[in-house]
Amino acid sequence: MTADRAATGDAAKRTVLVVEDDASIMLGLRINLEAEGYLVLPAEDGEKGLELARSERPDLVILDVMLPRMNGFQVLQTLRREGMAMPIIVVSARTGEMDKVTGLELGAEDYVAKPFSLAELLARVRAALRRGPRTVEAPRTLHEFGEVRVDAAARTVSRAGAVVEMTATEFDLLLCLIEARGVALGRDAIFSRVWGPNHHGTPRTIDNFVQQLRAKLEQDPQRPRHVVTVRGVGYRFDP
C-alpha cells in the first residue's frame, strides 16, 4: 500500500491491478471491483501490466494468461523473480492440469478458470488480501555453472569471461531451465513458460533451441553436462 493510501486510514481502499485484453471482461471486473471499494488499475497487455505492477505496487493482481506482447506466465515469473510478493490470481480459459500447475509453481496465489463467477472471483480476491503478501525469497539474479555466468537482471551470458550472444528466446529458455534446476520439465511446460500457453509449436522447436544452447554453453555439446535430456519427458538443468 502506498503512503498516500495509508494516510487516508481507509483499509478497504486497496489497489487491484487487472491485466486482461478482453474489453468486456475488463469492464465487468472493473465495475464489480470498484463497487466493492477497490481502486482498479487496468492493463490490456502483459508489458503494460508489468510496467504498472512495478510502478504502482498494487495490493493484488488479477492476471490473464493469454495476453498480447507478453503472456501472463512471463509476467508472473518476472514479478516473482523481482521479489514482488503481492497476491496474484491467474485467470485463464485454459483449464488443463499442466497450465494450473505451471501457474502455481511460478508463484500464483490462485488459478481461476474462465468463464468464472464474479461473486466467486471477488470472494477469492478478499481471501487473498486477508492472507496478505506471500513469502518470496530474495531474487537470485546471478547463476554460475562451469565457465558460464548468467545475469538474469541484465539478461547477459558470458563463458570464460567472453560475452555469449543470445536471442531473447534462447535466454528465456535458459532461464526457465535454470530456475527449475534439478527438475525435469516436459515440453508442454516449457512451451507454457517460455512461449506462452497459446503457442502451438512442435517438440522439434524446443529441441532445436536446446541444441543451440548446448552449442553455445556446453564444453562438449554432444555430451552435455548442464542441459540434459530426460528421455520420455523433456529436459533438466543440472548445475
Image (cartoon, rainbow, N blue to C red):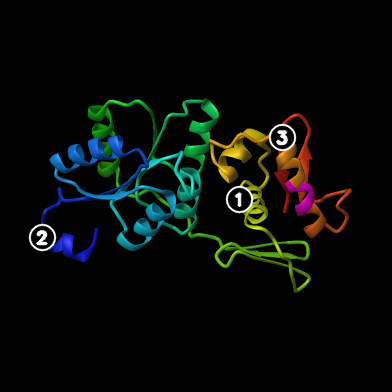
Residue 179 at what x, y percent from top left? 60, 50
Residue 203 is labelled as 3
Tell me if residue 197 is in the magenta stretch: no
Residue 112 is labelled as none
Give the dominant element type of the magenta stretch: helix, strand or loop: helix
Residue 201 at what x, y percent from top left? 65, 36
Q: Secondary structure at mark 3?
A: helix
Which quadrant, please, contains the N terminus?
bottom left
Measured in 3D between alpha carbons, the distance from the residue under mark 2 to the one under mark 1, in whole angstroms, is 40 Å
- Residue at left offset 69%, top offset 61%: 166
- Residue at left offset 61%, top offset 39%: 191
Residue 8 is labelled as 2
Measured in 3D between alpha carbons, the distance from the residue under mark 2 to the one under mark 3, in whole angstroms, is 54 Å
- Residue at left offset 13%, top offset 63%: 7
* Foreground of the two, 77 or 51: 51
- Magenta segment range? 209-213
Residue 20 at what x, y percent from top left? 36, 42
Residue 111 at what x, y percent from top left? 40, 33
Can you name the residue that lies furthest to the bottom here? 161
The residue under label 1 is: 179
